[in-house]
Image (cartoon, rainbow, N blue to C red):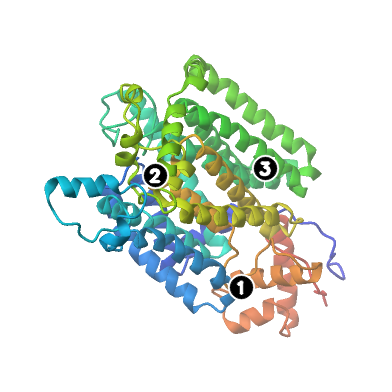
Amino acid sequence: MHSGVNRDVRRAPRLSIGRTVRTLIHAPRGHFYLTAGVFGLSIVFGGGTRSGFLGDAVLQLISLPLLWTAISELLDCQEPSRLRRLLPYIAAVASLPLLQLVPLPPSIWTSLPGRAVIVETYGVLGYPLPAHPLTLSPTATWLSTLGLVPPIAIFLGMATLDYEERRVLSLVLIAMAVISVFLGLLQLAGGANSALRFYVVTNTTEAVGFFANRNHFAVLLYAAMLFSFCWLLDAAVSVASKARRARLDSKPVIYFAGGAVAFIALLAGQLMARSRAGLILSAVALMAGFAMAMRDRRARNGSHLSKVLLGTIAITIAICSQFAFFRILDRFGPDIVSDVRIAIVRNTIAAARAYMPFGSGLGTFVPVYQMFEKPADIAVTYVNHAHNDFLELWLETGILGLALLILCIVWLVRRAIAVWATDDTGDDFRIDRNLMRSAAIVAALLLVHSLVDYPLRTTADLSVFAFAAGLLVSPLEKFSACSGGDVQKRQAKKSTFAQGVSRRHKPARQRELWDGGGDWPAEWRDKRVRAETEYGAHGGDVRFTELDDKK
């Protein structure tokens, strides 16, 4: 044998999906499975466009254990500075609709804007004025408050997961989106009266998956597309880094093929849904994905890699679009400027001004809007939402809701800048960094989509937003790969994280030896060198360190 081990040996990047699958199999915490279960079920049961469905009630009930365990873990952690940033804001979001339900004496609520109709109603009936909450419809506000439980639980649950577990949840999102695409195919095959359409009021001529609305279905698809692009990039880099003779029979090739199939299915589903906003934002998501690839040093080192990905996506679009080309053109045919949404926006702004500064109450859009709706608009369509989440929030919560929204956007912008400005880190953290970058883009796309629709009014899409926001929070009691500091601090943080993952099931003596803190017997040292050399040649996660062969 040689007298030593070459420290400059370059190993192929270890494919992250392999470790992620093992995390799914060997995860020791029930809290992880609870978070994954609630997140997956929120996509299945949370596709309705209004509150009060049975699926919403079931989802809210099963979210309570996750909410309890997540808050318990956050309170037990040793990072009070992070608690000051997380829990007070969440408490404020949850308290706002609850404050709207507090009964107020007649001397107070009658002086609020927009309450003259209620006063006149009691006068006509001859009843004395009772105590009344700030909201015009307590039942609707209660239902909307309960609808916040699943996304809040998912966000807090994400804050208590480590990097490996978060990777698994991104795969859960992709898997649920792919299943939803195949469900949409069956819905198209079954026609308008297909029993697989779960909601009575729905787009009967389109694929909607688990949703009632094709626009909300499109949100799940472009979010999953961006996350699947991260995994596709990771697998492509692993394939490109292997020797030519080892590529075709390696696991990275299998993972790359599976990722490509999932990505193509999601893109085809987006074309089937025919959502105008979904198609435009999907194109933005693809451009963001390539920007992410260009930021990845691994992809830049192999210039042909991005060309292969770009060619694959271009061919996919060309093949899929020919089957839906005329249907997609039909969606962009009508004059978008004359869309009924303009009248809805105009009436919503008038109603929001009338109920300033505290709003009409969460969930009260429908009865309030009908008082400001013009006769010409009534003959066109039934309006259940403002098709602009920001305006609807302004109408229902006033300046307090807008203030919380601004704080949320400021936090998202700061986290997005921090994530995208981060330099390259080790191979073990690149997929996590790309997932965080994708999460920032997904959150931004959802906010942009909310300007022309109401995706955040559905539990499923709001849960996707909570998942993306949770990815931007550094794991508790772990070190983030995208944190600041000098090079030495980042190396120390990466080393601590890698040791924490590898030590999970190792005895103390074994950890001491493998971490270099123990004295290896000579015969063990020789076996270790041979094992590492062989394992590293097959793409294993091996870094050659201070090992000398005494033989």
Counting from the top left corner in percent of width and height, residue 189 is at 34, 23
User: Decide: marks 2, 1 in contact (CB < 8 A)?
Assistant: no
Q: Name which of mark 2 and mark 1 comes first in the sequence.
A: 2
Q: Is residue 511 visible?
A: yes
Mark 3 residue element: helix
- Residue 277 x/y as whole percent: 52, 31
Quarter of the picture containing the C terminus is bottom right
Q: Position of residue 228 (x, y in %)?
A: 57, 43
Q: Residue at x 59, y 69 (%)?
A: 501
Which callout, 2 or 3, points at the residue further toward the start of the chain? 3
Q: Secondary structure at mark 2?
A: loop
- As drawn, the label of residue 236 is 3
* Camera-side residue of 438 and 215: 215
Question: Any mark on residue 500, and which?
Answer: 1
Query: Label 1's element?
Result: helix
Q: Are marks 2 and 3 in contact (CB under 8 Å)?
A: no
Q: Quadrant of residue 368?
A: top left
x, y percent for residue 448: 56, 40
- Which residue occupies the foreground of this view, 402 or 201? 402
Please tell me whether residue 190 is drawn above or below residue 295 in the rendered image: above
Amino acid carrying mark 2 in the image = Thr
Q: Which mark is residue 103?
A: none
| The residue positioned farthest toward the right in the image shown | 3
